[in-house]
Every structure is written in C-alpha cells, then in structure tokens.
Image (tube, helix red, strand yellow):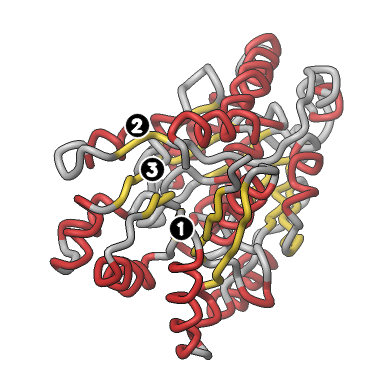
Amino acid sequence: MNVTKSLVVGNFGGTDGAKCGQTIKTHNFYTLLNQDPDRDLFKFDTCCLRNKPWLVFYLVYLIFKVNKVIILPAQGFLPLLTSLLFILRVKSDYIVIGGWLPEYIKHSNICTRSYLKSHCRIFVETNDMLNMLSNFSDYVYLFPNFKEIKKLSIEDVNLDSRGIYGGDIKFVFMSRVERTKGVLIAIDAIIAIASKRIERNFSLDIYGKVEPDFENELLSYINNSCSGNLTVVYKGFIHSDEVQSKLTEYYALIFPTYYAGEGFPGVLVDAFSAGLPVIASDWKYNSELIKNNRNGFIFSPINAESLVNTLDCFLSIEKSLYKEIAMNNLNVSKCYSFANAKLIVSEYGI
C-alpha cells in the first residue's frame, strides 16, 4: 500500500496553541489528515519563524522530504512561503483561512500572484470567494470551514433551559475579543434591549482571547454596562473542545463583526452544531451563511441601532420558529463536520 508523505505548513500558534480562528483551523486540518492511516504526516509551524528565522532551512528540508505540500499561511507569511515554493518549483494545495485573499491578490507581488495563479490549487471557504477568484485562476475550489463536532438532536440542546418559555435570556459573544469583532456594539445593543424589555432579565457572556491593547477598555465598558436586569461578563478563553456544549446553554449568538479579514468564522460552525440561532452583521460573507428566519438574522454592520431592532424582532418570534431555526442549524452542521471535510479531501486528492 502506498503511503503519501504530506507536509502541512501553517500557523499552529507555537507554545500558545490554538486560540484564534487561524490556529484552530490549522490544528483541525492537521488532525483531519492525521486520521488517514495511509498518510505519513509532517508539520511546520510558521509561528516559530518570528524568533527563529533560520528554521526556514528546516522548512526547505521538509518540502523536499515529502511528495505533497499543503499550506495554510496567515497573511503575513504568504509572500515568503509562495516565493519559496515558486523558487523551489514545488506545487501545493492552499487551504485558505479567512476572507482576505481576493482583495490581497490585487495588491500582491508578481511572484506571489504567479505562484497562486499557476502553481497551486486554492480552496476557499465560501461560494462568494469562489466566484471572486474564478477569473484569477482555473484551480479554485470550495472547501467550507469545518470542525470535529458531536451530532446533537433537538432534545440534546434542551430548548426549555434557554428561556424561550420564560425566565432569563442569555446571549453569547464568542470570538477573538477586539474592537472590529464588534463586541462593544453587542454590549451597546444588549443595554438598549434590557432597558426596553424591563420585564425580563438579560445577560451577555463574552468568550475569547482578548487583545492586550483592548483589555482595559473592554473591562471598563463592561463595568459601566450592568444594570438591574442586565449582566455582562467577560468569561475569558474557552477551549475548542468545550465550545459546542457551552453554546447549547444560550438563547442566541451575537456576531456583530466588521473585521476586514472575516471569512467563514469557525464560531458559526459551533453555533450551528449547538442548534443556536445566530444574529450576525451583514459583513463580508455572513449573508451567504446566515439567512433570515432560517438559521438566524442579519443586521446592518457597524450599527448598534440595527442590531437592537433585529434583536427586538428576534425576541418576538413565535416559539415554533425558534425551534425550527434551532433544528435547521443542527441539520446544516453536518455540512461542516470532519466527515464532510474528509469527503472533500478524498474528492480532490488533497
């Protein structure tokens, strides 16, 4: 039996591990390939080059050691990696993380453009990205984001505990915690909703790694937001293995991002797998992934008032529609599972 020697090159996060969308997907992809008994798998963590640039020579050694190279570079490392592979005349499969590539290509250097156009296959997360890059290369394919998730039923998620029949309503924000992910917009909107609907108690729990230069502002914002019927708490970082179970406890995920590099956020896969409705900004590719009344609701980006109005409408929907949205998300989550990702890997021979 032939064994494929494969090299995965990407940001594994160094000693910090998987704590953001980039590193989590890189780890997930490596884990996915590592489940193939007919594959001899190697990896190179681009994060280590920040402090040990001489390890690029070890990368060259690994590239020549294998017969298949798969790259998942962050934006900053793409020029170096594509230039290196171009010079070495080594083809690769590029698993894109995020939604920045179509715009980036317009301003990239000649070497990077030439390599991406003619020397590698590009796998993007959304159909919109696929369409945007179709005129650039004939070798662009769809590979949605995915995670190793547990299959849940509508009974498993326990809708009664979410507050749809009364009681406290718990919203959740889960992402890298920085300004452009919209966390302050989420807080402002929840404050407004709580003041309008004083008959109910509300909470917003915030999970994720907070950017160091934003932490003091965030905590100050949170301290000034709580009121008689509203609690806002920063809960810190949560390990990816715990996310799905934790999300089942909430009424909805609020995702007000306006981050320039947004693609197919992994937290949407988590929300779908937990049967959780998503209230998302109409930013980048979100409207391809979130459909009103089907698996959540869309609101105007960078607009707290629009989010307030959307939340107000969402809180007024019939319980039967809430249950339908929850079931739709549970059903669609299978499209973003390891099992489906394995089918794509097999189909394209990645």
Residue denoted by label 2: 127
Q: x, y percentage for residue 139?
A: 27, 40
Amino acid type at image mark 2 = Asn
- Furthest-front residue in view? 1
Q: x, y percentage for residue 334?
A: 63, 25
Q: x, y percentage for residue 43?
A: 58, 65
Amino acid type at image mark 3 = Phe
Seen at 14% across and 39% down, the residue is 135
- What kind of element bears circle 1? strand
> What is the spatial separation of the Cα atoms under label 2 and label 1, in whole angstroms?
19 Å
Vertical side of 192 occupied by 292: above or below = above
Q: x, y percentage for residue 69?
A: 44, 57
Quadrant where the N terminus lies?
A: top right
> What is the spatial separation of the Cα atoms under label 3 and label 1, in whole angstroms?
10 Å
The reply to whether discs 2 and 3 touch (Cβ–Cβ < 8 Å) is no
Vertical side of 7 occupied by 325: above or below = above
Dot 2 or dot 1, earlier in sequence = 1
Amino acid type at image mark 1 = Leu
The reply to whether discs 3 and 1 touch (Cβ–Cβ < 8 Å) is no
Residue denoted by label 1: 72
Vertical side of 148 occupied by 241: above or below = below
Circle 2 crowding by C-alpha within 10 Å: few under 14, some 14–19, many from 20? some
Residue denoted by label 3: 123
